[in-house]
Image (cartoon, coloured by chain):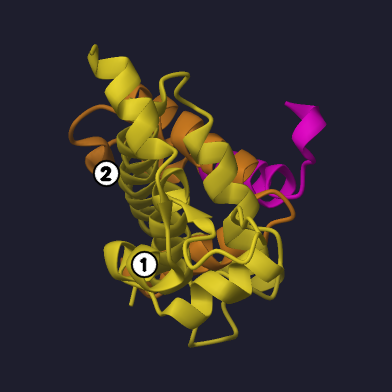
Chain colours: A orange, B yellow
């Protein structure tokens, strides 16, 4: 806990994602992106993945954040 | 008379702003405003029923997006249009759109869980997204 990695409540994180959605240039594309990334993560992660080494694999979080931040700004014809 | 014809006739049914508003759970003023903005159809023929029932799913979806996602009508209208277009069948369009929104919420939760567990508050902070305690857009 001391490294501050777990001090963000899930609801706040969800609220931030929702704000990205409402402020996106293309909310529909953002929706589809969230569904695609969420489903990919669900199939990728083991059931008890929080105990796994994945916790140390920040690339996963970086990838998700990057995809969402960049993807939310994509225009319709990019898809 | 087959079901398709019946449904088509019902969809084409002309209704008043009050009737449409009552069915959708919005104010008649909203119906008039959205019609003026071109978000829903309006037949300015002097009739007391210048609206069409087929716009009901769009109005209900717009209401949901505005109330639950704090969207502006100008954002909600095109999104509602695209969500309704997912299904080629008019009769299933509204339910399909709702399912897409449900799927979005479920996967949004997955992403929130992953990002929280990975402690990605710092990444979000870097983007200036965590500063506002009152993040806009949460379901009311």
Whether B100 is among the magenta residues is: no
Q: Secondary structure at mark 2?
A: helix
Q: Answer yes or no: is residue A3 visible.
A: no
Q: Nearer the viewer, residue B29 or A45?
A: B29
Residue shown at the point (44%, 38%) measured from the top left: B12
Q: Nearer the viewer, residue A13 or B75?
A: B75
- Magenta residues span A60-79
Q: Earlier in the sequence, mark 2 or mark 1?
A: 1
Alpha-carbon distance for marks 2 and 1? 12 Å
Host chain of mark 1: A
Check disc 1 and report the residue beneath it: A6
B61, above or below B68, in the image? above
Whether A76 is among the magenta residues is: yes
Quarter of the image for residue B9 reads top left
Q: Secondary structure at mark 1?
A: loop
Check disc 2 and report the residue beneath it: A50
Residue shown at the point (70%, 48%) measured from the top left: A26
């Amino acid at each position: 806990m001391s490294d501050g990695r777990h001090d963000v409540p899930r609801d706040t994180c969800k609220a931030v994602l929702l704000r990205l959605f409402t402020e996106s240039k293309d909310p529909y594309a953002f929706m589809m992106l969230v569904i695609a990334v969420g489903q990919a993560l669900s199939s990728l992660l083991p059931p008890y993945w929080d105990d796994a080494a994945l916790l140390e694999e920040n690339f996963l979080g970086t990838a998700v954040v990057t995809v969402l931040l960049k993807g939310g700004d994509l225009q319709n014809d990019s898809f | 008379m087959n079901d398709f014809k019946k449904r088509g006739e019902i969809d084409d049914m002309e209704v008043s702003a009050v009737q449409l508003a009552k069915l959708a759970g919005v104010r008649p003023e909203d119906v008039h405003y959205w019609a003026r903005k071109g978000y829903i159809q309006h037949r300015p023929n002097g009739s007391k029923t210048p609206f069409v029932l087929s716009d009901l799913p769009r109005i209900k979806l717009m209401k949901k997006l505005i109330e639950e996602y704090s969207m502006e009508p100008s954002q909600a209208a095109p999104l509602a249009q695209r969500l309704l277009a997912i299904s080629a069948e008019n009769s299933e369009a509204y339910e399909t759109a709702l399912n897409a929104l449900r799927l979005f919420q479920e996967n949004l939760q997955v992403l929130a869980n992953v990002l929280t567990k990975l402690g990605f508050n710092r990444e979000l902070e870097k983007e200036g997204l965590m500063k506002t305690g009152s993040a806009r857009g949460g379901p009311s």
